[in-house]
Image (cartoon, rainbow, N blue to C red):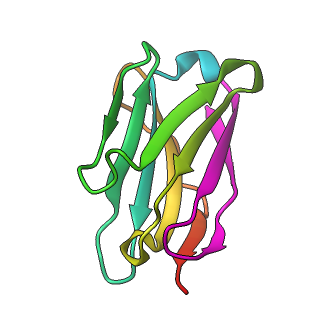
Amino acid sequence: QVQLVESGGGLVQPGGSLRLSCAASGNIDAINAMHWYRQAPGKQRELVAELTSGGSTNYASSVKGRFTISRDNAKNTVYLQMHSLKPEDTAVYYCNAEDPYGRRSSWGQGLQVTVSS
């Protein structure tokens, strides 16, 4: 099993930046990919960014060019660096791990990100 602890988030003005962190522990060798999702009020949870063990990345079109997913293997931590934030980026953000069989880790409590002036 993989345990994930999310940190970061908060209130930021439009155009600002924020970095989210997701620290993994447990059976981290089983992680094949890491994902960041978000869920805005009244909307379904959506994939924001993903990073495979091979280093490939994928982004939602709405965040491409503004968000960057990366990892620090020494710290077993995945980051989501967010720039040029917009009010529509306001949501609860979650990280999630996937093993080679497509099985996912449990969802955490998430991080509230609010973009507002």
**Highlighted range, magenta:** 1-27
Residue 86 colored magenta? no
Q: Is residue 3 left or right of residue 39?
A: right
Q: Locate the C terminus and report the quarter of the image it occupies.
A: bottom right
Q: Residue at 75% of width from left, 18% of height from top?
A: 74
Using the image as rendered, state which of residue 78 and residue 87 is in the foreground: 87
Q: How many labels were placed on the picture?
A: 0
Q: Residue at 31% of width from left, 34% of height from top?
A: 58
Using the image as rendered, state which of residue 62 and residue 54 is in the foreground: 62
Q: Is residue 46 left or right of residue 53?
A: left
Q: In x, y percent, where is residue 63?
A: 34, 53
Q: Residue at 37% of width from left, 50% of height from top?
A: 48
On screen, residue 105 above or below 102: below
Outermost residue toward the right in this view: 75
Outermost residue toward the left in this view: 61
Q: In x, y percent, where is residue 37?
A: 42, 54
Outermost residue toward the bottom in this view: 117
Q: In x, y percent, where is residue 24?
A: 67, 34
Q: Locate the N terminus and report the quarter of the image it occupies.
A: top right
Q: Quadrant of residue 104?
A: top left
On screen, residue 61 above or below 59: below
Q: Is residue 23 left or right of residue 108?
A: right
Q: In x, y percent, where is residue 46?
A: 31, 58
Q: Residue at 71% of width from left, 28% of height from top?
A: 26
On screen, residue 74 above or below 50: above
Q: Main secondary structure of the magenta part?
A: strand
